[in-house]
Image (spheres, rainbow, N blue to C red):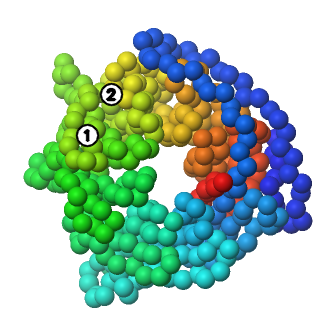
Amino acid sequence: MNLPRLFIPRPALMLRLLPACLALVACNLSAGGLPTTPLPATPPPIESRLIAVWVDGGSLFIWRTGEEYPRRIASGAVIDPILSPDGAYVAYTRGPGGHPLSLWVADTDGVAERELIGTRALNPESGDFVRQIGQVAWLDGHTLLFNTALAPALPGPGGGKADDLWAADAHTSSAARLLSDGAGGDFAPSPDGTLIALATPGRYEAADGHIRLVDPAGTPVAGLLDFPAVSTASEYAFYPALDWLADSSALLTAIPDPDLIYPAAPGEAPRQAVLWRLDAAGGASSMGSVPAAFFGLPRWSPDGRWLTYLEQIGAPEENALRLMLAAGDGSAAAAVVTGLAGALEPPQWSEAGYTYTYGDPGRVWLGAPGAPPIPFPMAGESAYGLIWVGPDTAVYTSAPYAPYELRLFDRTNPMPAVITAVAEGLPAFDAVQIP
């Protein structure tokens, strides 16, 4: 299929988005008993701008709505870009061989590229481990949060997440550690930027894990939940996913049975994952539980009204799963589709609905409570690395590795458009949509 192009590196073609309808595909599984919500009518188009950044051959490129050509804004060993919420800055990790040894930032105008923190500041003294950039997220329009991981300086075992917390400022080009090793963890900033949720895993059968809140300076605000550390049957630790409600009033998380990864004994009831509401003002309340698989734990919609999870069916060796959609407290669960482990993947919620992948890799379906799923972006087309940049707009790649096309999908005009063709490297991109 010839897709319309937003631009290409040779003389630009005119963008021609051809109207197309997505054929509804009836779901064979009943959703009896599941509360439903009518699909909202497609809202009228809102004038907005898309900003997309991507890595091609170690260089960072950017394109914005209204610009005819992409621009290269950084060259050499760029690994992963992260756009600020207002689209004013792009942060990116850098390092040889794909090792994120430094964190950089540039204006999206393509000027004032500068290093926020590098190897020397992260590792003031030599040792057995090299500290690298881990999780990175914007707290607001100019403040970055990140944590680090410790990699062996020489080939060998050891290392892992440092469970620390750092902050960097794009305005002042400075970075500082907020919490020392072991005092931070995986983090999730609240949508309003006033709180940071932190999760540490504990040690299986030895020490509990913790979820707590700090303010943007790293000052403790509240301890929310202690939980028995969960086995992963490997050297990796279990960190619970933290889903903030859109109004920042609470976050939702699922804590599995510590032994969920191991098969239940014959005749034993399925192990459960407990659903928790953790209030920003402090306090935790259990909402219920679901028999989720270890690699398909519950995730909530932004308003907390719905959740999805994967449930094992049949004998463990059959590797059969079904995708479940339920109310936010786990009640009224109904099957959506069945598939095999490795082909049926956990859904990704957007503001407009959720997506889930099954069948051949790259085959994506778009679903919403109360409606049958539809192929995304259309029947016969593949999508990888999908990110939602608005209720109706998504960016994705046409293949899991280069060469691939970075594509744009808009529900109001669903024929996907090509943003660019990428010649080298694994997909590493980000996009935001701003008024």
Query: Residue 238 at x, y = what percent?
Result: 27, 50
Q: Are marks 1 and 2 in contact (CB under 8 Å)?
A: no
Query: Which quadrant is home to the N terminus?
Result: top right
Q: Secondary structure at mark 1?
A: strand
Task: Return the mark for residue 255.
Answer: 1
Along the viewing direction, whichever of 212 and 207 lies nearer the viewer = 212
- x%, y% of residue 337? 50, 23
Report how far apart the C-alphas of labels 1 and 2 lie in the structure.
14 Å
Residue found 44% across the figure and 16% down from its top:
34
Amino acid type at image mark 2: Asp
Residue located 65% across and 21% down the image: 25
In this view, the mark in front (1 or 2): 2
365 or 156, which lies in front?
A: 365
- Dot 2 corresponds to which residue? 329
- Placement of the C terminus among the 4 image quadrants: bottom right
Q: Secondary structure at mark 2?
A: loop
Q: Would residue 51 be found to the left or right of residue 287 on screen? A: right
Dot 1 crowding, Cα within 10 Å, few <14, some 14–19, many 20+: many
Horizontal and vertical percent for residue 274?
A: 25, 33
Bin the neighbour count of mark 2 within 10 Å (Cα to Cα): few under 14, some 14-19, many 20 and up: many
Q: Is 296 left, or right, of 103 in this rendering?
A: left
- Please identify the quarter of the rendering in which residue 404 is found: bottom right
> Can see residue 374?
yes
Query: Hey, which quadrant is residue 107 in on the image?
Result: bottom right
Name the amino acid, label 1.
Ile
Q: Earlier in the sequence, mark 1 or mark 2?
A: 1
